[in-house]
Amino acid sequence: MLSNMADLVTDYRLLIAEVYELAGLSRRISEREAAENGTTVARWHILSVVSEEPLTVPAIGRRLGLVRQAVQRVADDLVEAGQLRVEPNPAHRRSMLYAITPEGVRVLERLWAASEPRRLDTLAGSGVTAEDLRHARTTLRHLIDALTH
């Protein structure tokens, strides 16, 4: 039983190492693609996160693993560029919600369209299926939920 627990912990550590490596590789590729499309990876990531629902700066930071100050600076730039708008937060008067605008959606769709061929090639070459990705995402979500509760 103890050996199984030790193996479980080792497998967890190895998974985290793989996630970090994948995130780093993906970020470097995304930085290049963002620059080719006249933006930054930080802007792209924030637009992606709020495309699902309006979020506060701290919530965006948690999703992206970034400090609040860094997110605030980029979010303010996106508001100034007309790609995000600030909305009142009914749950917290002082922590506003950031929502994507139609212009932000256009930028995000352009970025996704530009990166899709490379991502499809990568996925095709990897042998990974949609089911594999869904299973991996479920596993990661279970771990995230366990760590945050």
Image: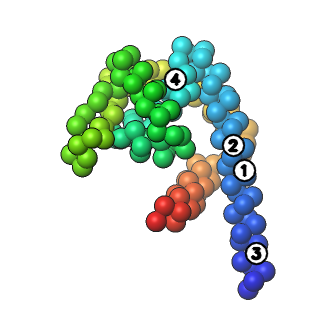
Q: Which residue is mark 3?
A: 6
Q: Nearer the viewer, mark 3 or mark 4?
A: 3
Q: Rounded to the nearest whole Å, what is the CA distance between mark 1 and mark 3?
A: 18 Å
| Mark 3 surroundings within 10 Å by alpha-carbon count, few (fewer than 14), some (14 through 19), many (20 or more) | few
Q: Rounded to the nearest whole Å, what is the CA distance between mark 3 and mark 4?
A: 42 Å
Q: Residue furthest bottom?
A: 1
Q: Which residue is mark 1?
A: 18
Instruction: Name the residue at 36% across, 41% down.
Output: 56
Residue type pointed to by label 3: Ala
Assign a secondary structure to mark 2: helix
Q: Which residue is mark 4?
A: 111
- Quarter of the image holding residue 41? top right
Q: Rounded to the nearest whole Å, what is the CA distance between mark 4 and mark 2?
A: 19 Å
- Quarter of the image holding residue 76? top left
- Judging depth in this view, the residue of 24 and 76 nearest the camera is 76
Tags 2 and 1 touching, CB below 8 Å: yes
